[in-house]
Image (cartoon, rainbow, N blue to C red):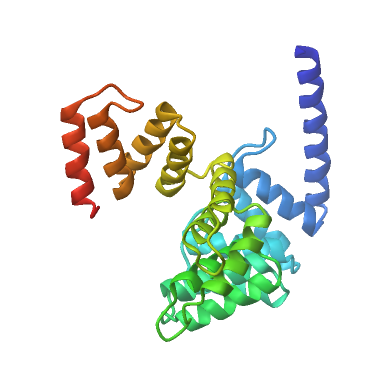
Amino acid sequence: MAGQAAKKQSSEKQEIEKLRKKAEAGDAVAQNQMGDLHWDGLQGVEKNQETAFEWFSKAAEQGNADAEYSMGFALLSGQGAGRDLEQGRTMLHRAAEKGHAKSMRQLAQVHFSGMGVPQSTAKAVELWSQAASAGDVDSIAILGKLYSVGIPGTIEQDHAKAFELLKKAAASGDSNSMHLLGQAYEHGKGCSANEKEAMQWYARADAKGYVSADSHHMLGINFYKQKKMGEAAKCFMAAARARHPVAAGNIARFFYWGRGVEQDYNMAFHWANEAVKLGE
């Protein structure tokens, strides 16, 4: 095993050396890849964001959109270079004009937050929509969330449209959208209420590492219906600790009656009080 690991490491070093030579010879794609490696410290390459920025600059000079995006991000955040909002926006615009979806999304955030420009929700939504049309999953997910709540003067609340966008983002692996899709099915927003579908989407979100009070509470209800009181109690407790009001009331009742947990009137009183504070 040790021999195989050493062989793999040696092979990676050789590949990186080849990549470095291509970059030094002026290959823009290789220059951008060297920037990525130094930015995150990947494949044994030293993490050095200043060096990464230098490589991004070389690639961006040749019009590489990925490098223009990375330069823009670095300049906006002040990582790897001095913070320069105007130049950062310029680099993102260059990449966006080439159809670079992540740059469109980042520019949307700039306008939404008012980073060195007048705050404009309308402009942000326009850019998120462009990025979504270009296939950016994060932008599709953002629009789904926005349509689910609405933005006065910019986006009218539209649960049906939100549902379709969230479904598309969830199908592409976005865990937050999976969770929100579970909520939509649970409460019948933009679709017919369907507890089974809600459970499935909550479970998928959890499997992807998304932890939420809503999903724990829903799982607790599911275990309760199956008369698995111990599992139900664990789920209600997790949701209650995450400040879910109904779950707090449920775990209070579990402690009062000794369902799935050892009977404890003090804990029952504590969680009943918490439920009231949370609006149950």
- Residue 73's x, y, as percent? 55, 61
Quadrant of the rendered structure where residue 262 is? top left
Which residue sits furthest bottom? 153
Quadrant of the rendered structure where residue 229 is? top left
Which residue sits furthest top? 2
Residue at screen point 44% across, 71% down: 149
- Above or below: residue 253 compared with residue 186: above
Residue 162 in view here: yes
Please state which of residues 166 and 111 is positioned toward the viewer in this rendering: 166
Residue 87 in view here: no
Quadrant of the rendered structure where residue 29 is? bottom right
Quarter of the rendering occupied by the N terminus: top right
Please state which of residues 174 and 88 is positioned toward the viewer in this rendering: 174
Residue at screen point 43% across, 36% down: 224
Residue at screen point 20% across, 41% down: 272
- Residue 78's x, y, as percent? 47, 58
- Above or below: residue 50 compared with residue 106: above
Residue at screen point 48% across, 70% down: 148
Q: Is residue 237 left or right of residue 179?
A: left
- Above or below: residue 49 compared with residue 241: below
- Residue 253's x, y, as percent? 26, 36
- Residue 91's x, y, as percent? 61, 71
Q: Is residue 134 left or right of residue 197?
A: right
Please state which of residues 125 and 81 is positioned toward the viewer in this rendering: 125
